[in-house]
């Protein structure tokens, strides 16, 4: 096979007309600039908002494939929502400081806690997700996923004062609902009981009510599964049915210890 025919065959199989990886890179730059604008004291808000508007304009050029949708109007609504998002994120940071005995200061939370960073990017992406803006919110949360090990789908609904401790391995599905003052630890999965394409428009992921704590490596599955308010889910629990309020659920493994004595 000659060189030219290889080129032609590769071109024939590049079938996705909208697949531009430059979009992914630009979303990451936009996400970083947005995070610094909201939190970094040395980043000028007025100047950066203008830069973000330009960034967003480039993103709409690359990602707004449905020409009938006025993607350019999204920025105005998104900009209006940012102060409220920041208020929510400040509550998240305060919840971490209040709940984690290892936290030394709130500045440490903003700069060093992967759980906070993942929540921040989720909340910023969720506002765009609600607008129906294609792909960009998912690229934002996947960027946070790559940096933190936390996979939060931008479609999830998360209430006030959310706390993820240690962060790594957390998975929160698209239709999950998490209410106020919820704490979860590393390795927790809020997932679907069944995974088929036919369920795309249904609620596949659980609901977690107020003041619930879910410890490490617990798995909670199913769109009809509700964890009642004020409950505690112990580590390694596997839950596929609802739990009433004020419950404690724990997994008891069988542990055998064998000792060898000298004869």
Image: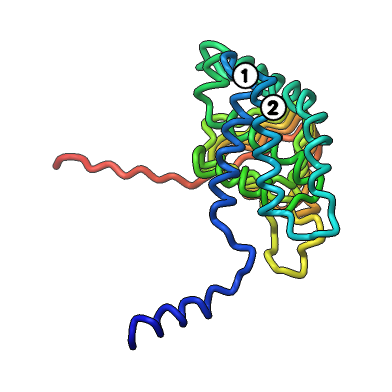
Which residue is depicted at the point 46% across and 82% down? Answer: 9
Badge 2 crowding class, 10 Å Cα cut-off, few under 14, some 14 to 19, many 20 or more, is some
Question: In this figure, which residue is indicated by the disc labeled 1?
Answer: 99
Horizontal and vertical percent position of residue 88: 74, 24
Q: Residue furthest bottom?
A: 1
Total numbered badges shown on the rendered structure: 2
Residue of label 2: 49
Residue found 63% across the figure and 68% down from its top? 17
SS class, disc 2: helix
Q: Is residue 104 left or right of residue 175?
A: left
Quarter of the picture holding the N terminus: bottom left
When the figure is inspected, residue 210 is found, relative to residue 135, above or below; the finding is above
Here the colouring is rainbow
Name the quarter where the C terminus is drawn. Answer: top left
Along the viewing direction, whichever of 43 and 248 lies nearer the viewer: 43
Locate residue 5, reporting x and y percent.
40, 85
Residue 79 visible in image: yes
Q: Specify whether 112 is left or right of 86.
A: left
Image quarter of residue 74: top right
Locate residue 228, reporting x and y percent.
79, 37
**Whether residue 227 can be seen here:** no
Neighbor class of circle 1 (other Cα within 10 Å; few <14, some 14-19, many 20+) is few
Please tell me whether residue 94 is drawn above or below residue 14 in the rendered image.
Answer: above
Q: Identify which residue is drawn at 33% across, 86% down.
A: 2
Q: Nearer the viewer, residue 138 or 12?
A: 12
């Amino acid at each position: 096979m000659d060189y030219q025919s290889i080129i032609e065959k590769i071109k024939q199989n590049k079938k996705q007309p909208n697949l531009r990886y430059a979009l992914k890179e630009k979303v990451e730059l936009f996400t970083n600039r947005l995070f610094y604008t909201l939190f970094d004291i040395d980043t000028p808000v007025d100047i950066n908002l203008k830069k973000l508007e330009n960034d967003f304009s480039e993103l709409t050029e690359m990602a707004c494939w449905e020409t009938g949708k006025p993607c350019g109007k999204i920025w105005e609504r998104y900009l209006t929502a940012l102060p409220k998002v920041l208020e929510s994120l400040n509550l998240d940071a305060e919840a971490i400081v209040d709940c984690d005995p290892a936290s030394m200061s709130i500045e440490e939370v903003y700069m060093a806690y992967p759980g906070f960073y993942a929540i921040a990017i989720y909340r910023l992406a969720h506002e765009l997700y609600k607008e129906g803006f294609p792909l960009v919110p998912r690229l934002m949360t996947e960027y946070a996923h790559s940096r933190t090990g936390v996979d939060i789908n931008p479609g999830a609904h998360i209430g006030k004062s959310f706390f993820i401790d240690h962060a790594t391995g957390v998975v929160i599905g698209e239709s999950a609902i998490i209410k106020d003052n919820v704490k979860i630890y590393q390795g927790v999965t809020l997932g679907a009981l069944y995974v088929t394409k036919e369920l795309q428009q249904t609620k596949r992921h659980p609901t977690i009510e107020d003041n619930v704590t879910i410890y490490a490596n617990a798995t909670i599955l199913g769109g009809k599964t509700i964890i009642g308010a004020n409950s505690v889910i112990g580590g390694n629990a596997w839950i596929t049915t609802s739990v009433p309020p004020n419950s404690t659920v724990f997994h008891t493994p069988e542990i055998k210890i064998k000792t060898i004595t000298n004869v």
